[in-house]
Amino acid sequence: MKDTLLDLQDIQKSYDATPVLAGVSVTLSAGETLALTGESGSGKSTLLHLAGGLDQPDAGRVLLHGQDIGQMDDTARAEARRLHIGLIFQQFNLVPSLTVGSNIALQARLAGRHDAAFCTTLGHRLGLSDLTTRYPEQLSGGQQQRVAIARALAPKPALILADEPTGNLDEDTGDAVLSLLLDLVSETGAGLLMVTHSPRLAGRLSRRIHLSRGALAAA
């Protein structure tokens, strides 16, 4: 039995009195890959933000390695993200004053786990080897997305949270990026929770759950 990495227990969340999540429970084990699907507005991104400690639930528990990050203060949650979580969101949030190479290394340096050889390997596998001295403004949207993915993976996080990580990529590149994510999970024992609208991509993960109107439902 693999260790439970992430345990979301009866999560409830509303914004401006509008319910977004209504008692959602999800578990993710180390080394497991889980696809989260659902229509727009079903609460997928909200659940991902709560899992990453970027927001706090109104009720329920968000346990990471058995610790309730939903009850931590902002400083402690930021520390948990830095040390344990790789975030891949649709907003790239690259640092404009840093080169591609420095952007890729940033999270690993902050976590105290910078591995130059691994960063180089990530850049190569994501097709960024010839772009390391460029700046974000010199890149296409797809290239920026690949840099953001490399940055999230560089510290070898225990938990990878990805919101449509291939959304700005063509199908072939998207398939290659997902293969890299799955390889990293296999190599490091990380857990992957990925939001996707693609049944084809969801089918490549070990398990799938579906959200509808803020609750788990049949896909």
Image (tube, grey):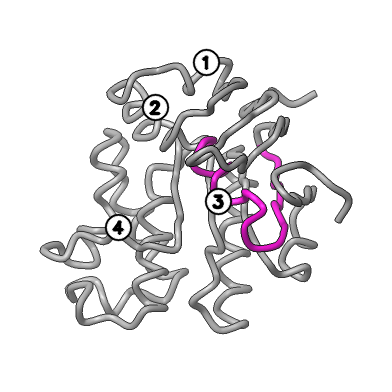
Disc 4: which residue: 104
In magenta stretch: residue 184: no
The magenta span reads 31-51
Q: Quadrant of residue 22?
A: top right
In magenta stretch: residue 39: yes
For residue 61, side relative to residue 152 (left or right): right
Disc 3: which residue: 45
> x, y percentage for residue 41?
62, 57
Which of the marked residues, 1 or 4, is nearer the chain's N terminus? 1
Q: Amino acid at mark 4?
A: Ile
Which of the marked residues, 3 or 2, is nearer the chain's N terminus? 3
Which residue lies at the image location 38% right of the left edge and 62% below the top edge?
Answer: 91
Which of the marked residues, 4 or 2, is nearer the chain's N terminus? 2
Disc 1: which residue: 67
> x, y percentage for residue 103?
24, 58
Disc 2: which residue: 80
